[in-house]
Image (cartoon, coloured by chain):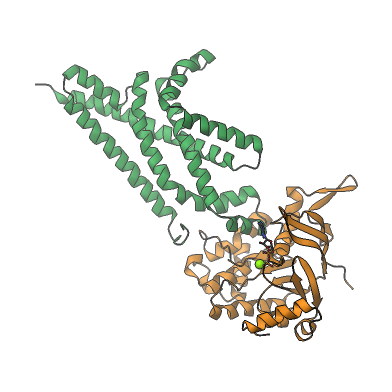
Chain colours: A green, B orange
Amino acid sequence: MTDWSGYIGLILQGALVTVELTVMGSALAVVMAFLAGLGRVSRFMAVRALATTYIEFFRGTSIFVQLFWVYFVLPFAGVTLSPLQAGVLALGLNVGAYGAEVVRGAVKAIGREQREACIALNLTRGQAMRYVILPQALPLMLPTFCNNAIELLKGTAVVSLISLTDMTFQAQVVRAQTGSTLIPFATILVLYFLMALAISYAMRWLERRMTRGLDGVRT
Amino acid sequence: MAAPIIRIDNIVKRYGPLTVLDGLSMEVLPGEKLALIGPSGSGKTTILRILMTLETISDGHIEVDGDQLYHMPKNGSLVAADDRHLHRMREKIGMVFQHFNLFPHKCVLDNVTLAPMLTKGVARAAAEKRAMELLDMVGLADKAKSMPAQLSGGQKQRVAIARALALSPKIMLFDEVTSALDPELVEEVLNVMRKLAAETDMTMLLVTHEMGFAHDFADRILFFDRGKIVEEGKPDEIFRNPRQERTQAFLRKIIAAGHRV
Ligand SMILES: Nc1ncnc2c1ncn2[C@@H]1O[C@H](COP(=O)(O)OP(=O)(O)O)[C@@H](O)[C@H]1O
Ligand SMILES: [Mg+2]
């Protein structure tokens, strides 16, 4: 008879790593999404080109390859990262590239009329973005951001390849040690699902807060 | 006679092969109330948008309040205006749009206070005090905390007027401000404009299809057709005695369509 409590504890430790990766990866992804998304609508050609290159590159190559580069190739350039840092960096940059298109789309969706009102009221471009465009664009981004965050959560499993002890990694350890496949993998299935659910609820709560009194905006 | 506050000199506006304004010149005196009328597509909106710097010009010069609008002097010659110059010029001009363009995520009061606080550094308390005066003037003081989505079209447009006035521009541009409204809401907006015309010495340019209103409101009527001013004069001259064939035809059509003159 196997004593499961120790093994479940192992998986829960892995769950913590997965949560950590998801939270930090998402934070980086949001930053990158806004940098690159706003860069895409910049009036400076060089900024637009830089943003486009970043987006196309990270959407056009797989997270798997990106992770290997960050972890195994960057050291040759003198940058050595811990597995956790490498995981956060790869996931954040990858998902941020998708998020950038969401930011750009939402900003573009706030139409010409709002921009022109800003010009007529003599706001600077930065003021218009900060006080008028982004507050309206944000609620438009949230549903897709929610999907992206869940994608990122699911993507975290890839870091077990660089021997980071996330939830999937620990499940494999438990499987190897106990010979049971069902219990560890059923456990992480439920845990991944609960985490995704938590993200969904958090996003929906945010969305409700942001759109309060805003009916008629999301056309 | 005072020097013109707006001097438009031979401007051309093209969209690709389409010439929308074709060597247009006009002058506006300080405090003057102008109504721009004419068939749709004749360039009335375009000239207001150019004055608001929402469009560029293909050729010509515009002087507003003594300064070039799209150019600035540099080393003895005129060069294209930079952002700083444009911001300085935009301070003098306000615009009210056909579709109000209120900020839907801000309450009525915040719609009115946002620009003065951001562009003129007015403190919130002072901005709100002034905003309440303006909202009172347009009859909406009780709606200060409402969101735009909760207002009728006529109320939205009156908020938009208050919002533009909050920056105290010398020149106000109104582009068909009642044509997106249900007929029964038109009058409440026109009344605000009448009050404005009577109580302020702001220069006002108004594009409208409300000929009766144009007649009462304006010191001078400009009749636009195909990117040119075909005829201009005092309201009585234009409406009772149009000299140009095209003005006559336009007014006949408007009257036939049931508009009061
Ligand atoms: N952004 C644009 N691109 C191309 N053509 C335009 C644009 N804006 C306006 N036009 C054209 O310019 C002409 C004048 O338009 P406008 O000034 O809106 O006329 P009005 O306000 O007198 O009805 C019209 O033929 C219109 O189709
Ligand atoms: Mg028009």
Quick check: which quadrant has ligand 1?
bottom right
User: What is the quadrant of the C terminus of chain B in the image?
Assistant: bottom right
Name the one closer to the observer, B86 or A50.
A50
Q: Is B201 on the left or on the right of A206, as rendered?
A: right
Question: What residue appears at the point 13 percent right and 23 percent down from the top-left corner?
Answer: A3
At horizontal 49% and vertical 67% (from top left) the residue drawn is B146
The answer to whether residue B166 is seen in the rendering is no
Q: Residue furthest top?
A: A76
User: Residue B215 location, x and y as percent?
Assistant: 72, 82
Q: Quadrant of residue B135?
A: bottom right
Asked whether residue B81 appears in the rendered view, the answer is yes
Decide which of B39, B64 is in the foreground and name it: B39
Quarter of the picture containing the N terminus of chain B is bottom right
- Can you say whether B232 is above or below A82 in the image? below
Would you say A176 lies left or right of A58 here? left
Above or below residue A212? Residue B170 is below
Counting from the top left corner in percent of width and height, residue B129 is at 61, 67
Q: Is residue A169 above or below residue A148?
A: above
In the image, what residue occupies the spot 64% across and 54% down? Answer: B118
Where residue A14 sits in the image (x, y, percent)?
29, 26
B211 left or right of A35 in image: right
Q: Which residue is at a point 81% across and 81% down the rendered structure image?
A: B243
Q: Position of residue B75 (x, y in %)?
A: 89, 44
Q: How many marks?
A: 0
Along the viewing direction, whichever of B171 and A15 lies nearer the viewer: B171
